[in-house]
Amino acid sequence: MNKHTIFFSKLAVLITLSIFGNTLFAQNDFAFKLVKPNQNDQIINKTEELSVEITFNVEAVNEIGAYIATVADSKIVRFSAATTMESTFTDNISAAYLGEGKHIVEYMLLPSGSKDQTEALAKIAINIEIKGGSFKTDVDIESFTQDIVETIRKNDVEAFKSYCIDKNAMDGMINSIKGDSQKESGIKAELSSMNTENLRKEMTANFSKLQKALLEKNADRSTTKFLGFLEKDINLEMPEFSVMDIRFGIDGGNSFIISINAFITKDKAYLFDFEFHTGLFDFMRN
């Protein structure tokens, strides 16, 4: 090997090291920083949301095509969708989605095409403790739904009506709302506008259709189970009652989902909507 060859080989190595070094520098300069909340340990109520803001070095991130993955309790639940990332990154963590208890939500900067959490280029962890609200109930929602399913199977329309919201129950909830703030006044007005008689008529009008569907799907009390992986939405929570949207699965050889909307008081539940869905349970379960 002559001296010219040696010189050019050394020059190539120097150029390669220089380029590689700049790339490493860029990847280590993401400046991935949590701006909001200003602390990594948070306690929130189960009806609240936590706003998140993260800043980062846009040039460094986009140079390698990295993206942000949201990880809740070690499971990736969401990806940033943009082809190019923009700072500030924002998100909202729903306490209702996570449920009561302690959780860890992480934001990971992952290389393009990677879903491997061990390959995170940078990450931020937020420790969240979700406390229960002031409303407490003794109602077993699963048993309440199972009773409704059994009533429909037996074609007992009058018994079915006994589970539905009526004017007396609605008036009781409205009267339980203390205070006259804008929020409380708005809730009172919204509930007062609901025609309970019409709600009962709408639900009983589809009674035969519901019964046929439940019989076809072999749905009974024993096969009606709460699907923990589907959301239980608390649409409204007051000191004396709450409004919930809950989904249950039926897996008695035929897959099936029923959805109920109900007012829940401290000792009783009142149905105001009941629906069924087919073809979704298999998708959610697989």
Image (cartoon, rainbow, N blue to C red):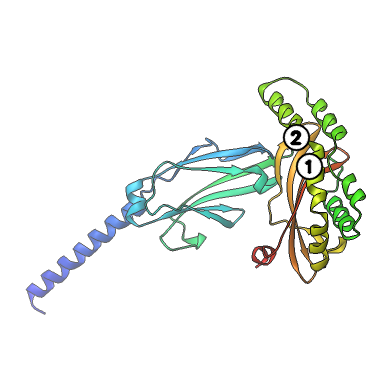
Residue 7 visible here: yes
Residue 62 percent across, percent down from the top left: 35, 52
Mark number for residue 151?
Answer: none
What residue appears at the point 43 percent right and 63 percent down from the top-left corner? 113
What residue appears at the point 19 percent right and 62 percent down from the top-left corner? 15
Q: With respect to residue 97, does 242 lie above or below? A: above
Residue 240 percent across, percent down from the top left: 81, 32
Mark 2 vs 1: CB contact within 8 A: yes
What residue appears at the point 86 percent right and 63 percent down from the top-left corner? 222
- The amino acid beneath tag 1 is Leu
Quadrant of the image occupied by residue 252: bottom right
Closer to the camera in the image, 199 or 283: 199
- The amino acid beneath tag 2 is Met
Say which residue label 2 marks.
Answer: 194
Say which residue label 1 marks.
Answer: 199
Label 2: element kind: loop
Q: Which quadrant would the N terminus be assigned to in this image?
A: bottom left
